[in-house]
Amino acid sequence: YLINHGINFDPMVTASEEYNLFIRLLAKGRGLSIKNIIGAYRVSENSLTNRQISEWENERVYTLEQVQEENPGIYTRYKKDFDEAFCRSKYYRARYLMSIGEKWLANDVMRRISTKNMKYFILYLLTFII
């Protein structure tokens, strides 16, 4: 399936390889969600993913643009989902900014997406408190 669709891990993506691979795969066909836990994921502050928090936004946007390029017309069919995913990339930008002490820049990023969804509005409000 991967070979038939020309999909593999993208060497340009270093912080969210799985996201890139799975989103590109799902754009080509159907996926299945199961409720049973079949694996474990260890969260660590020193993980490669967490050390590359500055790249989360860029890699999400890269992946979403890659999916659109590989699947013409997909944005039109799934506009709401793409818009949410692009908002999530901005949220990741705000998380990075908060992590380096740039609270007011993070606040500004969250302000721009605060009207898109209640969760982003609440996160925007939290940037005033944290």
Image (cartoon, rainbow, N blue to C red):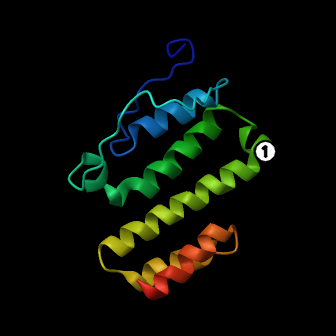
Image coordinates of residue 46 in percent, x first then y, are: 20, 53
**Residue closer to the observer: 70 or 39:** 39
In the picture, which quadrant includes the C terminus?
Answer: bottom left
Q: Quickly name the residue at label 1.
A: 76
Q: Amino acid at mark 1?
A: Thr
Q: How many marks?
A: 1
Image coordinates of residue 101 in percent, x first then y, are: 31, 79
Query: Furthest-front residue in view?
Result: 36
Please, is residue 4 above or below residue 87 in the view? above
Identify the residue at image location x=58%, y=45%: 65
Q: Is 66 positioned to the left or the right of 96 in the image?
A: right
Identify the residue at image location x=57%, y=45%: 64
Identify the residue at image location x=57%, y=32%: 35
In the picture, which quadrant includes the N terminus?
Answer: top right
Image coordinates of residue 86 in percent, x first then y, are: 60, 56
Location of residue 5 (image quadrant):
top right
Callout 1 crowding tier (Cα within 10 Å): few <14, some 14–19, many ≥20: few
Please, is residue 82 above or below residue 70 in the view? below
**Residue closer to the observer: 15 or 117:** 117
**Residue closer to the observer: 79 or 122:** 122
Q: Is 127 positioned to the left or the right of 86 in the image?
A: left
Please, is residue 61 above or below residue 71 in the view? below
Please, is residue 88 above or below residue 21 in the view? below
Instruction: Give SS at disc 1.
Output: helix
Query: Furthest-left residue in view?
Result: 46
**Residue closer to the observer: 12 or 38:** 38
Image coordinates of residue 126 in percent, x first then y, are: 50, 80
Location of residue 121 (image quadrant):
bottom right
